[in-house]
Image: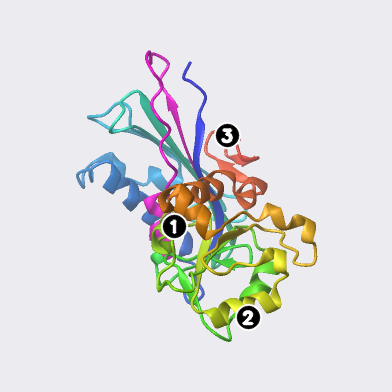
Amino acid sequence: MNLPIQLHYRASFDVSEPYIKGELWSDCTKEIRKWISRKIGRPQRGDSFWRGWFFRGGEWNHPQDKATTIRTGALTGSGTETAPQFWALRYRHADRSCSHRMWQTDIGITVLDDNRLRFNIQVGHYMRANFLGEMPALPEPTAPGIVQSLLKNNRWRCMAGSQDLLSEPETIKAGQVEQVVKALKNKERTCPVILVSKERDNTHPLINAATLQRLTAGAASVYLLETEQVESEFEFWAANRYRCNQGMVRAYLPGLDFSNEHDAQRHRYFFPRQISEEGAESVIRQLVRMCCRFAPGAKARVFFHWRNCTVLPVPID
């Protein structure tokens, strides 16, 4: 028996295609297949990897690498045979730098309407049953490439509940703060939002917002407070204990209520002194772990699992 699987990354969000109806499921599953093909070395065009089983349900084993397997399952539901309502994939492969570690990616797709689907993804890793020796260090969580591909596709809009998911950090300018505060307070938001402010005498924030957004893609959205004026506007709309200014970095979790001061501690923050003492990379790692491993929005959603083609609770805790 293999050692228990450990959660590496988890996200759940909706993908919509506002302008073209009926092609979203096909385009999304093809994007997933393209992503896997790049990871396994682009199989030859005549290889069975490229056949229809990937969409209908089936299994594929890498001809040169027995550790690499792909399984898919589909359930028609209210959809069609060529575009089922439910579809799921499990992709397993060995770690390139530690052959005793196995990686497992589970993806579930649920079609919600003609131009919107729910995309669930969980990535975990475990040690093989025959492993003997010192346990290797846990890999730091990062967003899978398929998530980046979905977010960067200009035809699609990705949202975690009411919150737009970003592929790059967005700068909040003067006059936009009220809109951002309303988005933070929206009860339908299901992912963290991270605000990054600047110190008074520093033209750049203490942490790299672009790196933070890349590592938390699909699990959080990162915004930069551009100027002191923007910070002042935010202080006006938010209660004092929820502030983010003068070099602070703060993660606002779903269920935010600015009127409840007792809940402020739940929304993690770092002061400039903490960032300087712990190091920017350490702070980024802490935020990434929180967003990618413990995001409450992903926990609450159903996950369509390939094994028995039914709607199951999220399997990794």
Quick one: label 1, few (<14), some, or many (20+) residues within 10 Å?
A: many
The residue lying toward the viewer, choosing from 277 and 60, is: 277
Q: Amino acid at mark 3?
A: Asn
Viewed as shown, does residue 90 lie left or right of 183?
A: left
Quick one: label 3, few (<14), some, or many (20+) residues within 10 Å?
A: few
Identify the element where label 3 is drawn: loop
- The CA span between labels 2 and 1 is 24 Å
Label ID, residue 212: 1
- The CA span between labels 3 and 2 is 51 Å
Identify the element where label 2 is drawn: helix
Label ID, residue 227: none
- The CA span between labels 1 and 3 is 36 Å
Residue position for label 2: 233
Q: Residue at x 53, y 58 (%)?
A: 220
Q: Which one is earlier in the sequence, the residue at label 2 or at label 1?
A: 1
Residue 200 place in picture, x, y as percent:
49, 74
Magenta span contains residue 141:
yes
Q: Amino acid at mark 1?
A: Leu
Identify the element where label 1 is drawn: helix
- Quarter placement of the C terminus: top right
Residue 158 place in picture, x, y as percent:
51, 65
Q: Which one is earlier in the sequence, the residue at label 1 or at label 3?
A: 1
Q: Are marks 3 and 2 in contact (CB under 8 Å)?
A: no
Q: Residue at x 43, y 55 (%)?
A: 147
Q: Which one is earlier in the sequence, the residue at label 3 or at label 2?
A: 2
Give the magenta range. Answer: 122-151
Q: Which of the 4 image quarters holds residue 164?
A: bottom right
Q: Which numbered disc, 3 or 2, marks the residue closer to the eye? A: 2
Residue 44 place in picture, x, y as percent:
19, 44
Residue position for label 3: 308
